[in-house]
Amino acid sequence: MSGPNGDLGTPVEAGAEGEEDGFGEAEYAAINSMLDQINSCLDHLEEKNDHLHARLQELLESNRQTRLEFQQQLGETPTDASP
């Protein structure tokens, strides 16, 4: 297992019984499957985040345009017309 900085801990030494590393093929396959699921979830979250960011950018631009239109109707000078 990795530490808080991603550093690997001390490697597991072979036991007196001749144990290699304590993990078999089934355990590695299960860990690999879980990592694939986590990666898939993170990809999905990243897509949703990108979509939300794009929608918020659209909303921000729409609000800026609306504010500028109101200011023009009132005959005021826009105070912040920068993007």
Image (cartoon, helix red, strand yellow):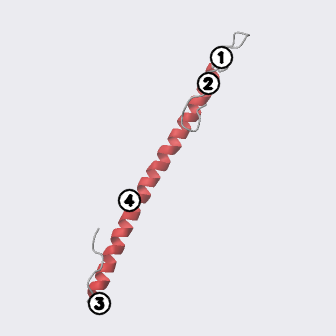
Q: Closer to the camera: disc 2 or disc 3?
A: 2
Residues at circles 1 and 2 in contact by the CB criterion of under 8 Å: no
- Residue, x 59% and y 35% (percent of image)? 3
Compute the Cα span from label 1 to label 2: 9 Å
Residue 7 placement, left or right of 54: right
The residue at which mark 2 appears reads as 10
- Residue, x 46% and y 49% (percent of image)? 46
The residue at which mark 1 appears reads as 13
Residue 75 placement, left or right of 48: left
Secondary-structure class at tag 4:
helix
Disc 1 marks a residue whose amino acid type is: Glu
Q: Residues within 10 Å of mark 2 (few under 14, many from 20)?
A: few
The residue at which mark 3 appears reads as 74
Task: First in sequence, mark 4 or 3: give its number.
Answer: 4
Q: Position of residue 22 (x, y in %)?
A: 67, 19
Q: Position of residue 56 (x, y in %)?
A: 41, 64
